[in-house]
Amino acid sequence: MLRLFRQRQPEKSKAITPTELTQYPMPRHVAIIMDGNGRWAKKRGLPRAAGHRSGAEALRGVVKACGDLGIPYLTVYAFSTENWKRPQEEIDALMGLLIEYIEKELDVLNKNEVRIKAIGNLNQLPEKAVKLIENAERKTAANKRLYLQIALNYGGRKDIIRAVQQLAADVLAGKVRSEQIEEQLFASYLSTGGIPEPDLIIRTAGEKRLSNFLLWECAYSEFWFHEVLWPDFHKEHLFQAIYDFQHRQRRFGGLVNEENK
């Protein structure tokens, strides 16, 4: 007799190994809201810029871990459209760190078959940063091991509006008929068009909100929240998040039935 599946609770205190993770299907796309850099720095009496620098180190480790695990897509929220409200000194430090990260990491990322793609309105970024991003995208365009999508000056609402405007323009130009518009077509107009929607969204620093991140794409994503501040996020946290994801049942609005559970 069929009965509703009762979800098994993963062991929170258990140290997860990559070997254990490979026994279950991996998420195809992991997205991360990297939160807590400023609080990390404040706890240590350091300037906020020091927290962002340490956060970049944490990102380096996560990119490597995703590549090693065979996860094909990783999206990170690096700078939102709302982050312009921060002090100019912090914004300048973030932009400088972005330039430094690309200059230092590009050859390593390319060697490790990581493809770089930036989403968001890049026009407001410093010219040097834009040129470096464009060069990184060109140089890594053929890489297939990991698709690293960096959200820069990105906002989910603005991206949806931009997609609507482009779709409306194509309808007026006769390129698309109104009756052709459906979810898959609309999704192709988003900045993330052409890649899978995120299976797993991770947010650090104890916050439990999306903050305007991938609003359309996250309709059926699983969420994993943790108190750890982003600079202290290591591959062990990533392993735990994936392990928890693997032990959930994704119903997509339906029911999951299993025998003898």
Image (cartoon, rainbow, N blue to C red):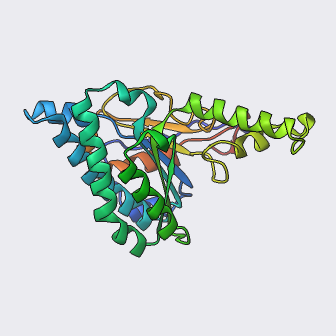
Answer above or below: position of 77 versus 133.
above
What residue appears at the point 89 percent right and 34 percent down from the top-left corner? 178
Can residue 52 be seen in this snapshot? yes
Please give left or right for residue 218 compared with residue 98 in the image: right
Quadrant of res 43? top left
Quarter the N terminus occupies:
top right
Q: How many labels does the image show?
A: 0
Residue 256 pos. (x, y %): 70, 39
Answer above or below: position of 69 versus 186.
below
What residue appears at the point 21 percent right and 33 percent down from the top-left corner? 89
Q: Nearer the viewer, residue 128 or 68?
A: 128
What residue appears at the point 16 percent right and 42 percent down from the top-left corner? 50
In the displayed orientation, state which residue is furthest to the front: 127
In the displayed orientation, state which residue is furthest to the left: 45
Residue 91 pos. (x, y %): 29, 35
Residue 102 pos. (x, y %): 34, 59
Q: Nearer the viewer, residue 248 or 37?
A: 37
Can residue 1 be seen in this snapshot? no
Residue 225 pos. (x, y %): 40, 34
What residue appears at the point 28 percent right and 64 percent down from the top-left corner? 104
In the displayed orientation, state which residue is furthest to the bottom: 111
Quadrant of res 251? top right
Q: Which of 195 and 241 is in front in this view?
A: 195
Quarter the C terminus occupies:
top right
Quadrant of res 106? bottom left
